[in-house]
Image (tube, rainbow, N blue to C red):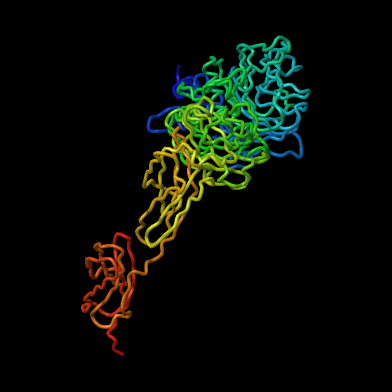
């Protein structure tokens, strides 16, 4: 199997030798340049849809080649296969030109057309290609009973010019979706296949092949009937056009994201690669619960295993170099929109990663068919620690390929009735780590919401979505669950440089141990202690003392690990440590050459006293052994000139600072 690059090189050489035409040769050289531009990276690889390069004759995608790339009125569309140059033409008056819409479909651009029948815009190619196997992604606008236009077709009509059955994916008046393979020979009537078209603005992956009368929608056979025996031929060779059919009366009204054309039929496995690439990129679900479909990468790796229970609302993030695909944000088109805004009442999830995953890494998510309403967790459906909590009935399944670490997840509660309201502490991801969907077995993980903005509940930097886990949303924590706002009396109080943490929980919770977490900024926490709970929680609760060093605001959080492995976090508490008054200067300004200090110590220790100039230069250092109570220290500062100085005392309690002025005392 030759690569696109190999084919293009051969094609350029033959054309230059046989035609001796500078114009033709330059066109073939352009073909080579386009393909070379698609080849990048340290190890050169050639990009093609799903990695299927053989027989590729046309590849247009709104995200690479539609101009302007910054969005706005369409001025051109580059064929990534390098065979055609397209010109924009129109028929009719008072028309609206097609536009490039950024974030039109799952964070990817689309080209939006507003044609109607004979009126509107289309793009005409300039080079004849062979069309046998075609896939496309997009949507139509308007009622299904309207003539909503055609994605793609040859420019010439079928036999006798009486019937135009030479087109791909026409949503016709009367509520039918048609594709036809016909002949341009006079006297030959063409046949075509029909299907039920999708509703207005519903994106789909469409595939048609002349071999086998194929007409698929989202990976499944969509045929509902045929006219005159179905497709007349297996291939059509002609100049291509976009957004119309050959009789010029089916201008596109809707969005086109991508079209892929092959000169020969793809095998079932290759077709799955192409459809997987398109479905993954645009957040479209292949298959259904009755006929689940697995997704395959350009390298032949299955990155979503079709599951009857979770073949709904499939989407994900990942990188596939062979397809030239980097998807860092994603949602399902069934519940979300082009920019991630959720549809009302559908509980849209958005996955995001701050940087692209490496080649071959994927994180995929699909849902079951359960409703988006709350239920109260009982012993029959949830872990003991969560009994009494409320959660969504619906669950989500995660599948990962490669090591996917931290990701951000958001849940849109628009149109849903949730008891947690707009309080972030009322929401957690409940994760079933063994992935059987039964939250009463195995270990569970609880991930607290990081915040709420508008209708979006955010879970930032989570690494808990491991391969195979099932998760749902806790909407109100129970009083039994050790969750952020359910710890009983967690407090943090300061005395000098010491901070005492005290907390309590319900006595019957099966807690194995606690971790104490410490932070200086309230965002990054590190564990500083682990405290086992050998019996039940004491009625008086538990305490832990932290010795801080220096003034400032410190933050604390507790983590409870239950005996079944589940973990829960407390609310964050903070304490401000102010400068101590235990260090004093007897006289300030200091007149003469003697500095007298007084320090109140709580225990015997050695402290370090350092003296600095106003510019920060160290002038003196003394080690001072102190005893409990008041201590006096005299420092000789005769050699120091007049001016402002700073003192710093370091000890087991932290550090303290003072400033003083040295003066001669003379007027």
Q: Quadrant of the N terminus?
A: top left
Residue 565 lies left or right of residue 213; in this view the side is: left
Tell me residue 290's x, y (percent): 62, 18
Considering only vertical position in the picture, is 443 above or below 521?
A: above
Query: Is residue 20 in view from this perspective?
Result: no
Residue 33: where, in percent of width, then height? 47, 31
Q: Position of residue 131 (x, y in %)?
A: 60, 19
Q: Is residue 427 above or below residue 384?
A: below
Identify which residue, 226 or 435, lies in the foreground: 435
Placement of the C terminus among the 4 image quadrants:
bottom left
Q: How many marks?
A: 0
Where, by quadrant of the figure, is residue 595 drawn? bottom left
- What residue do we see at 71% from left, 13% from top? 191
Q: Is residue 151 left or right of residue 274?
A: right
Residue extending farthest to the bottom is: 667
Residue 115 visible? The answer is yes
Looking at the image, residue 160 lies above or below residue 415: above
Q: Residue furthest front?
A: 539
Left or right of 355 on screen, residue 247: right
Residue 108 position within the rendered picture, expressed as x and y whole percent measured from the top left: 57, 36
User: Could you say which is closer to the camera, residue 158 or residue 25?
Assistant: 158
Seen at 67% across and 11% down, the residue is 232
């Amino acid at each position: 199997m030759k690569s696109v690059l190999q084919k293009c090189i051969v094609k350029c050489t033959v054309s230059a030798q046989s035609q001796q035409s500078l114009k033709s040769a330059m066109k073939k050289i352009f073909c080579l340049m386009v393909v070379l531009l698609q080849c990048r990276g340290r190890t050169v690889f050639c990009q093609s849809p799903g990695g299927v390069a053989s027989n590729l004759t046309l590849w247009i995608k709104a995200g690479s080649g539609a101009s302007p790339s910054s969005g706005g009125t369409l001025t051109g569309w580059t064929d990534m296969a390098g065979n055609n140059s397209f010109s924009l033409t129109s028929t009719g008056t008072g028309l609206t030109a097609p536009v490039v819409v950024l974030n039109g479909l799952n964070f990817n651009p689309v080209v939006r057309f507003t044609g109607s029948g004979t009126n509107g815009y289309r793009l005409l190619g300039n080079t004849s290609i062979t069309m046998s196997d075609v896939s496309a992604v997009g949507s139509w606008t308007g009622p299904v009973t309207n003539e909503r236009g055609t994605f793609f077709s040859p420019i010439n009509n079928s036999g006798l010019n009486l019937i135009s059955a030479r087109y791909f994916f026409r949503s016709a008046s009367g509520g039918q979706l048609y594709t036809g393979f016909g002949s341009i020979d006079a006297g030959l009537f063409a046949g075509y296949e029909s299907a039920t078209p999708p509703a207005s603005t519903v994106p789909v992956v469409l595939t048609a092949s002349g071999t086998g009368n194929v007409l698929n929608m989202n990976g499944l056979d969509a045929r509902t009937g045929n006219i005159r025996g179905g497709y007349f031929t297996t291939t059509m060779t002609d100049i291509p056009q976009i957004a119309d059919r050959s009789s010029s009366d089916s201008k596109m009204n809707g969005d086109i994201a991508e079209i892929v054309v092959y000169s020969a039929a793809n095998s079932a496995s290759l077709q799955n690669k192409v459809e997987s690439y398109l479905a993954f990129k645009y957040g479209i679900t292949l298959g259904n619960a009755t006929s689940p479909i697995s997704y395959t990468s350009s390298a032949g790796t299955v990155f979503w295993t079709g599951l009857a229970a979770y073949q709904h609302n499939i989407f994900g993030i990942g990188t596939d170099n062979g397809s030239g695909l980097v998807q860092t944000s994603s949602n399902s088109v069934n519940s979300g929109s082009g920019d991630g805004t959720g549809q009302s009442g559908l509980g849209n999830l958005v996955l995001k990663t701050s940087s692209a995953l490496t080649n071959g890494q994927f994180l995929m998510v699909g849902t079951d068919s359960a409703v988006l309403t709350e239920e109260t967790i009982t012993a029959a459906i949830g872990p003991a620690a969560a009994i009494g909590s409320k959660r969504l009935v619906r669950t989500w399944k995660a599948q990962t390929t490669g090591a996917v670490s931290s990701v951000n997840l958001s849940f849109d509660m628009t149109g849903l009735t949730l008891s947690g309201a707009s309080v972030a502490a009322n929401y957690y991801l409940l994760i079933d780590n063994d992935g059987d969907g039964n939250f009463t077995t195995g270990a569970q993980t609880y991930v607290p919401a990081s915040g709420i903005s508008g209708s979006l509940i955010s879970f930032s930097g989570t690494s808990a979505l491991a391969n195979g886990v099932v998760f749902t949303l806790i909407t109100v924590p129970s009083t039994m669950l050790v969750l952020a706002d359910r710890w009983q009396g967690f407090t943090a109080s300061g005395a000098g440089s010491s901070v005492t943490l005290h907390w309590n929980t319900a006595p019957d919770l099966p807690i194995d141990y606690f971790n104490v977490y410490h932070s200086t900024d309230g965002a990054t926490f590190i564990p500083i202690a682990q405290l086992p709970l050998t019996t039940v929680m004491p009625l008086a609760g538990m305490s832990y003392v932290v010795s801080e060093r220096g003034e400032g605001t410190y933050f604390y959080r507790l983590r409870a690990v239950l005996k079944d492995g589940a973990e829960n976090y407390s609310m964050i508490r903070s304490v401000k440590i102010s400068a101590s008054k235990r260090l004093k200067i007897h006289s300030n300004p200091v007149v003469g050459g003697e500095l007298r200090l007084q320090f109140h110590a709580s225990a015997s220790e050695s402290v370090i006293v350092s003296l600095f100039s106003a510019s920060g230069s160290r002038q003196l250092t003394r080690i001072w052994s102190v005893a409990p109570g008041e201590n006096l220290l005299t420092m000789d500062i005769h050699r120091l000139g007049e001016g402002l100085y700073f003192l710093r005392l370091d000890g087991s309690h932290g550090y303290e600072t003072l400033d003083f002025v040295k003066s001669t005392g003379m007027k």
